[in-house]
Every structure is written in structure tokens, then in C-alpha cells.
Amino acid sequence: MNRKGNWSVEEQASFLKRTGELLARGYPLAEAIDSLSYHLDRKKQKEIRSCIAELKEGYPFFQVLSDLQFNKHLVNYVYFAEQHGGLAEAVIEGSTMVLKREHDYDRLKKLISYPFFLIVLTSILFYFVDQVLLPKFTSLYENMNVETNIFATIISAFSTYVPLAFYFFVIFCLFVAGYYQFIFKNTPVLEQRRKLVSLPIIGKFLKLLYSQNFSVQLSYLFSSGMSIMEALNVFENNKQEPFSMSVGKEIKTILAAGSEFEYAIASFPFFEAELSRIIKHGQENGKLDQELFFYSRHCLAQLEEWTERGMRIVQPVLYSVIGLLIVALYLAILLPMFELLQGI
């Protein structure tokens, strides 16, 4: 039974994290969820009671969360956790990662919101100066034989090319939306991932993200004693996540053709090349689960570093562009005025 979810991602992750903490203390799943329901509003309490009833009827926890339309990454973590038996630890880790990601999104939105406001304000000021003030001053300076300065030229060029850039951006967005709706969505999921990681800048970030998710889930499955084929079966049976199903099935096909596991992983361009080397090394030393776990931590650290670096770059660049534009607006008007005053 599908229900319309009314939980924010942060609420979902916090709820699951506290659930994992109670599970780690020895609470049964239904009792842990019931205990946490008292801290929620009435509507969510009603949903939680329905969840408990479904759990008692034998529905898996990930299916219950999927019915509540929880974040797909959280549902995916719960699905794999229920397969390998480490529900408490995996739920805590997955929830912590999603909370960190949401926190980074919030920080990025706050970093961009004020510069965005300045851009709108500056655009209004620019339009007023370019369409009203600057033409009058330019006409005055021409009548008084004062040469046009470089800043006025910059403003004029800016007013000419920015609208063209805006129209190009709108056309580009419409093209991307049309491509996504009519072509990309109908492309097999593995081909989608191949295309995404080929994108400049964001492709490297996505490749790290896919490698981190895949390696951490594999590490949990292997640590529970599963063989490679058993772990791949878990991926293939994950009907909540088309990518997991497809990658599990594809790897099994490659293995059936006689390839080694590390070579099968290396054949996918949406995984980091280092992942196949980690798998080979883990198989050689008999600690594949630990090697994959540490590698997932390495990927996560890199993702966090990239996010921090991006945040440190975005705001200064926006402020610099806005500041230069405002300075150019003022100098375009004031410099010729100073020349006139000097000639008096």
C-alpha cells in the first residue's frame, strides 16, 4: 500500500539513525520504532503504527520505508542491511551519510542565496544605469568631446552579450530537459551511468559516489560471510534500485563468461579504476570485506573534500563578478565626469 510521504529527508535520516542506535542497544525493530513514534507528530505516529502493523505481517523493513516514500538511498541501505544482518550499524552509517549530504546541500544553498539576491539587485541596477543613466551621460560626454572610457565599453558589451547568453542558457536548458525526458529516461540504467560519468567535472564526483556506494554495500555483504555470487544475487534482487539490479546481473554474466571478479568491475567506466585493484588486493590477502570498507571510507573522504572545495570557490567567484560589475557601472559614469571637472 503506497502512502504519500510527508517526511523531509533530514527527518527520515534522523529517524532511521535513532532507530539504528536503539537496535544497537538490543531493542527489537518494532519496539525501537514504537519508542521513537512518541517523539513525532500525530500524523507521523499514525504512519509509524501502520509500519509496525506491516512489519508484524512479515513485510521487510525496506519495503515499509519505500511505501512511505523514504529517500531511495536510505531505502537502499536498509535493503542491503536486511540481507547481511547488520541492520543497526548499516542504518546508522547510511543515515549519517545522508544527514551529512543534506547538511552540505543546506550550506551550499545558504552560500548561494545571498549572492543570488545580490545578482538580482545588481541586475536591476545594471538595467537602470544601462537603459536610463548611461545613454544620457554618453550623449552629454559626446557633445563635450569627452572620450568614452573602457568601463563604458565594458558595460555596453555586457548589455549586448548577457541577454544573448541568457537566451542561449534557456535554449540549452530546454534541450537538456527534452533530452532527459525523451531519450535519457528510456536508456538502460547502466548506459545512463556511463553517460553521466563522462560529463566534465561532475562526472568525477559521480564516479566516486557510485564507487563508494557499491564498495560499502559489498563490504557488508562479504563481512556477513556471503560469497561473491551470493552478494551479486542480493544486488540483482534489489527491485527498489534498478542500478543495483542491472549491475548485479551484468557482473554475473561477465563472471559466467570466465572473467575474474576484478576484471568484471574494471569493465564498468562508472566505477573508479582503483576499485578493481582494491578487489584484487583484498582477494589476495583474504580481507576483501575490510579492503572494500576502507576504500569506501577513502571515497567518502574525497567526496567531502570536493564538496568543501566547491563551497570555498562558489561564493568568492560570485562576489567577485558582482563587485567588478558594480565598480564598472560607477566608473563608467564617474571617470568622464572627473575629466570634465578637470577641464573647467
Image (cartoon, rainbow, N blue to C red):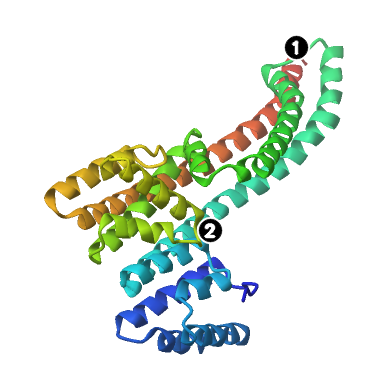
Residue found at x 25% / y 42%: 260
Where's residue 326, x and y in %?
Answer: 66, 34
Give the residue furthest to the top: 145
224 up-or-down from 316: above or below:
below
User: Nearest the camera: 204 or 283?
Assistant: 283
In the picture, residue 217 is in which quadrant? bottom left
* 3D distance between C-alphas at marks 2 and 1: 48 Å
Secondary structure of the residue carrying numbered label 2? helix
Where's residue 290, x and y in %?
Answer: 21, 57
The reply to whether residue 305 is visible in this rendering is no
Q: Which residue is mark 1?
A: 147
Rate crowding at label 1 as few (under 14), some (14 to 19) or many (20 or more) other CA atoms within 10 Å: few
User: Nearest the camera: 271 or 146?
Assistant: 271
Q: Which residue is mark 2?
A: 106
Residue found at x 41% / y 89%: 31
23 up-or-down from 12: above or below:
below
Tally of numbered discs: 2
Q: Give the residue type at disc 1.
A: Glu
Rate crowding at label 2 as few (under 14), some (14 to 19) or many (20 or more) other CA atoms within 10 Å: few
Q: Is residue 100 left or right of residue 189?
A: left
Q: Earlier in the sequence, mark 2 or mark 1?
A: 2
Q: Nearer the viewer, mark 2 or mark 1?
A: 2
In the picture, residue 225 is in which quadrant? bottom left
Query: Quadrant location of the N terminus?
Result: bottom right
Q: Is residue 119 left or right of residue 74?
A: right
Check residue 342 in the rendering and tell me which mark sits there, or answer none. none
The reply to whether residue 30 is visible in this rendering is yes
Secondary structure of the residue carrying numbered label 1? loop
Residue found at x 18% / y 45%: 281
In the picture, residue 23 is in which quadrant? bottom left
Q: Give the residue type at disc 2.
A: Asp
Residue found at x 23% / y 63%: 223
